[in-house]
Image: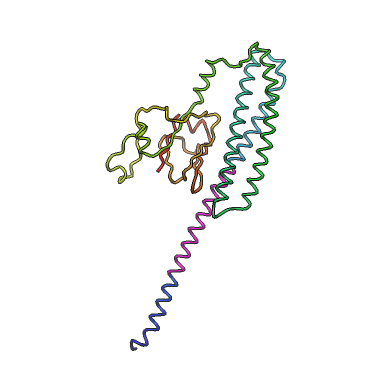
């Protein structure tokens, strides 16, 4: 067979090879797109489930407040004072959880709107959640008005406007106080929180090492009983928790521009360390 006869066959082979490459690239692109879409849906659903759990917790605490508020006048002063503390604690929990839930819904709405995999059904759900949270805010406002009246009753029973003295306040604050900070390795080293990395640390993939002692003044202070999520303006893949925290007590979720640390179990999460340190790449 001469060279002239072979030329059409060569051209045909080149066309087939080019077609195979296009199909392969297209297939990889579809798989990658599907994976990103699944990650977006999973992230959105995680936040959605957390908001629903928060609403359930709020309803439980409202029921506790209603139960505690009944027949305060008929109780002894010491008992009434203790009830006042419990009611105050439950109201603070409701307030903080309501605020956290509104922040989560705002994040959910923003991430979904900005995503190329936007889910229209999720827009409707966030709208419904916003309405439900607004309605709950009004209910809590009414409850606070009733609690204000109740506090006046408790004050008359205990002959004091303050339910807790300053010593008890400080003791209780210390029991529920925790600290967190985030920053690059260089920033945290400069603050004396991390040890300077060795010359070959990055090549060996070594984790940043915590200093044996550091000043907590640069840290943000949080109330363990009220903090169930912490927002970061960095994507999940750039955040690394370097302090020890119980596995399963938390989850980092988010999109391409921001993340949220969801604390599933406050007691377990802070049990190993009252300081949360996050390295940002």
Image-based side of 115 in relation to 182, left or right: right
In the rendered image, residue 45, in percent from the top left (x then y), is placed at: 57, 47
In the rendered image, residue 157, in percent from the top left (x then y), is placed at: 68, 12
Identified at 43% across, 45% down, the residue is: 238
Identified at 35% across, 38% down, the residue is: 186
Above or below: residue 89 compared with residue 186:
above
Image-based side of 104 in relation to 200, left or right: right
Residue span colored magenta: 21-49
Identified at 47% across, 38% down, the residue is: 247
Above or below: residue 2 compared with residue 74:
below
Give the colour scheme shown. Answer: rainbow
Report which quarter residue 17 is drawn in.
bottom left
Q: Is residue 254 magenta?
A: no
In the rendered image, residue 246, in percent from the top left (x then y), is placed at: 46, 35
Identified at 53% across, 47% down, the residue is: 43
Q: Pick the quarter of the image with the C terminus.
A: top left
Q: Pick the quarter of the image with the N terminus.
A: bottom left
Q: Is residue 27 magenta?
A: yes
In the rendered image, residue 95, in percent from the top left (x then y), is placed at: 61, 31
């Amino acid at each position: 067979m001469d060279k002239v006869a072979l030329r059409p066959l060569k051209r045909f082979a080149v066309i087939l090879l080019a077609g195979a490459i296009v199909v392969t690239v297209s297939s990889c692109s579809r798989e990658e797109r599907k994976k990103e879409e699944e990650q977006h849906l999973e992230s959105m659903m995680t936040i959605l489930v957390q908001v629903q759990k928060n609403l359930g917790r709020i309803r439980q605490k409202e029921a506790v407040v209603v139960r505690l508020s009944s027949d305060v006048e008929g109780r002894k002063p010491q008992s009434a004072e203790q009830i006042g503390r419990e009611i105050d604690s439950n109201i603070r929990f409701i307030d903080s959880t309501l605020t956290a839930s509104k922040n989560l819904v705002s994040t959910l709405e923003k991430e979904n709107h900005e995503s190329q995999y936007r889910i229209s059904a999720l827009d409707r759900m966030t709208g419904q959640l916003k309405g439900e949270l607004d309605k709950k805010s009004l209910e809590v406002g009414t409850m606070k008005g009733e609690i204000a009246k109740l506090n006046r009753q408790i004050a008359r029973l205990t002959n004091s406007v303050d339910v807790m003295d300053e010593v008890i306040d400080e003791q209780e604050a210390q029991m529920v106080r925790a600290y967190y900070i985030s920053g690059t390795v260089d920033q945290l080293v400069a603050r004396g929180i991390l040890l300077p990395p060795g010359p070959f640390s990055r090549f060996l993939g070594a984790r940043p090492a915590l200093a044996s002692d550091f000043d907590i003044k640069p840290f943000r202070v949080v109330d363990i009983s009220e903090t169930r999520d912490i927002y970061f303006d960095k994507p999940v893949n750039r955040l690394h928790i370097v302090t020890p925290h119980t596995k399963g007590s938390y989850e980092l979720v988010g999109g391409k521009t921001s993340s949220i640390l969801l604390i599933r179990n406050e007691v377990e999460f802070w049990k190993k360390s009252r300081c949360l340190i996050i390295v940002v790449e």
